[in-house]
């Protein structure tokens, strides 16, 4: 020690202090770097949420229905004959159908409104106990025409006339309207009005307001005639006295639209 006073060595403690100070400086710098500046913070707050500028909409479907009164009808009239020979069956069917067409023409049906829709020939056979055909016993000839009647008030009298002429099958009557254009236009307007009423109700319930129509399309347009009258064999139903009673009823035109409204 040489008698001199002891002087502590501070090198090690100084180094530790420098290291600690350096750590504090690094931590503070990292914190400052992680903290956004005033301009950066303002920029982040002003960034809009994705999708916030997308238009809000209400989508509804509207229906329009208009009742129409039929002014025309179609009916299929037929004859069936059975004879031992094909020639005899065909000749009889031809004679009967000519009489039917003449009766329809006399009742006011235009030639262009008479159309053949079926002509068929079938062989009539006998079968043994095993279901095997063993002999031809005759032929069946069927001939059918479709009549378009534009004066449905005379439809009952027409049916009576063709049955008197030899028709032995009636395959049904369907009614329609010859010009559904105006009814369809009315149904479209009604469908659009119905869609707007529904949209207004939804908007009021949600506390928003309708701005304008974004899209409008017609999804379906259907003309629904009355249920067809199902006729059958004239022979099986018997002969009615007087004109055949016919009720045309009413039909319906249905239009459906899809409407998209912008709201705010």
Image (tube, rainbow, N blue to C red):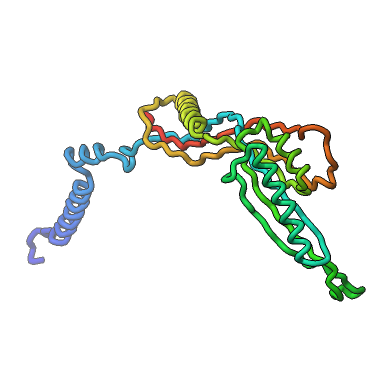
Q: Which residue is at the front of the view, 57 or 42?
A: 57
Q: Is residue 263 visible?
A: yes
Q: Which residue does the image show at 38% across and 32% down from the upper left?
A: 213
Quarter-wise, where is residue 70 in the image?
Answer: top right
Question: Residue 180: x, y in percent?
Answer: 52, 34
Instruction: Give 187 or 123, whichever is nearer the viewer.
Output: 123
Q: Is 210 placed left or right of 167 in the picture?
A: left
Q: Residue at x 55, y 36 (%)?
A: 178
Quadrant in the picture for the C terminus: top left
Whether residue 184 is situated above or below residue 173 in the rendered picture: above
For image coordinates 71% across by 37% down, the residue present is 158
- Which quarter shows the N terminus? bottom left
Q: Is residue 52 left or right of residue 175?
A: left
Q: Nearer the viewer, residue 131 or 234?
A: 234
Residue 105, given in percent of the width and then of the height, sits at 65, 41
220 and 2: which is toward the camera: 220
| Residue 262 placement, left or right of 81 | left
């Amino acid at each position: 020690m040489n008698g001199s006073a002891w002087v502590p060595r501070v090198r090690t403690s100084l180094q530790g202090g420098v290291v600690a100070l350096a750590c504090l400086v690094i931590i503070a710098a990292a914190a400052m770097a992680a903290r956004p500046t005033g301009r950066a913070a303002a920029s982040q707050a002003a960034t809009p949420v994705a999708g916030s500028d997308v238009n809000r909409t209400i989508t509804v479907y509207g229906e329009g229905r208009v009742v129409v009164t039929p002014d025309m009808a179609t009916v299929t009239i037929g004859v069936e004959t059975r004879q031992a020979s094909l020639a005899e069956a065909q000749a009889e069917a031809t004679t009967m159908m000519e009489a039917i067409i003449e009766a329809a023409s006399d009742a006011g049906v235009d030639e262009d409104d008479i159309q053949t829709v079926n002509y068929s020939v079938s062989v009539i056979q006998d079968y043994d106990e095993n279901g095997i055909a063993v002999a031809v016993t005759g032929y069946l000839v069927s001939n059918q025409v479709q009549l378009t009647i534009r004066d449905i008030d005379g439809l009952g009298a027409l049916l009576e006339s063709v049955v008197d002429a030899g028709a032995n099958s009636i395959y049904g009557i369907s009614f329609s309207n010859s010009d559904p254009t105006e009814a369809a236009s009315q149904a479209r307007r009604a469908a659009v009005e119905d869609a707007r009423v529904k949209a207004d109700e939804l908007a009021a319930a949600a506390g928003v307001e309708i701005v304008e129509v974004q899209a409008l399309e017609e999804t379906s347009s259907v003309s629904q005639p009355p249920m067809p009258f199902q006729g059958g064999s004239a022979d099986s139903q018997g002969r009615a006295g007087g004109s055949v009673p016919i009720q045309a009823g009413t039909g319906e035109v249905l239009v459906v639209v899809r409407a998209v409204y912008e709201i705010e």
